[in-house]
Amino acid sequence: MDLASLTGAYGVSGFEDDVRRRVLDAVGSASVDDFGNVIVGGRSSVAFVAHMDEVGLLVTSIEEDGRLKFRKVGGVDDRILPGAAVTLYGDGFRIEGVIGVAPPHFQQQQQTSWQDLYIDIGAASRQEAESLGVTPMTPAAFSRRYAEMGRFVSATAIDDRAGCWALLEAYRRGADATFLWTVQEEVGLMGARALASRSNVKNAVIVDTTACCHPNFTGNVKPGQGPIVRIFDNYGAYNNKLAKKVLEVARRRGIPVQIGAGGGGTDAAAFFVSGVPAIAIGILTKYSHSPVEMVHKDDLKYAVELMVALAEELR
Ligand SMILES: [Zn+2]
């Protein structure tokens, strides 16, 4: 499964079926819990974790004139909404939409809040919108795009399809570990919380993107110089013993990694509050939570090499 196919899947938090289907297709045999997390067991004491969901929007009501009111799902900046192309999706349908913006010809106010915006799907009435399959609770994801630009890939939902891809790639290379693809990370680590309290995971290594880069938050880390071992973020400090072990393995095997910190949080927090040592490997991502997220190809490659090494060493 390549990154293009994974970033092409729709997966607004709570509506990850399309991503889950692609993960299940790639691994062949796996179990899915009641929450929607995907689980593949292995013999090593390490569990690799990546989240399948992405930030997006959710239709909340349909106006008489066919326009759709929505709410945000996860951390979406209001500034990127006006002019965005979105895709509404559900069982058996895909509908293109746009978040309209008043043209400069007759613009009066500059600042727009998401609460003043609508999704326009070209329907002229509520009945027409409903006849297409749209109802309140229909998710809308940023319309898919994938582009290779120099050594970078820019695509929708790289957070965290990059991690989902890295897990699939480590699995394909025969890493004998537990693999967990979680749901609803962007709305409070919900899938991981459900898993962490019930699983017998010994060490959790979360593979997620890390918003790049700000000297105060991340430290002086750079895309292309290896994934970061995330030592701190808004959920606290990461387990030191495990972090040291990961750094030691990387150094000994000559796999480039950087030491950094993150804003926000990762599924690691769900594991360490359940008493499971956890760390996060962060793939530095420019323009996080926008439709043009960018990662460096070398960081993807080194993340997979590190995972394969950890599966061997954390037995
Ligand atoms: Zn993420």
Image: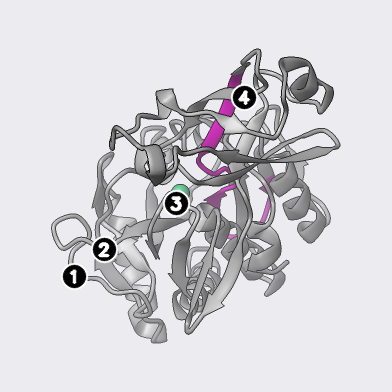
| Mark 2 and mark 3 residues within 8 Å of each other at the beta carbon | no
Point out which mark residue 266 bears: none
In this view, 287 is above or below 130: below
In front: label 2 or label 1: 2
Tell me the CA gap for discs 1 and 3.
Answer: 22 Å
Q: Secondary structure at mark 4?
A: loop
Q: Nearer the viewer, residue 260 or 215?
A: 215
Q: In percent of the image, x 28 and y 37: which residue is there?
A: 110
Q: Position of residue 84 (x, y in %)?
A: 52, 46
Q: Earlier in the sequence, mark 1 or mark 4?
A: 4
| Within-10-Å neighbours for mark 2: few <14, some 14–19, many 20+ | many
Which residue has dot 2 on it? 213
Q: Position of residue 5 (x, y in %)?
A: 71, 62
Which residue has dot 1 on it? 220
Which residue has dot 4 on it? 67
Magenta extent: 39-60
Magenta stretch holds residue 293: no
Q: Amino acid at mark 4?
A: Arg
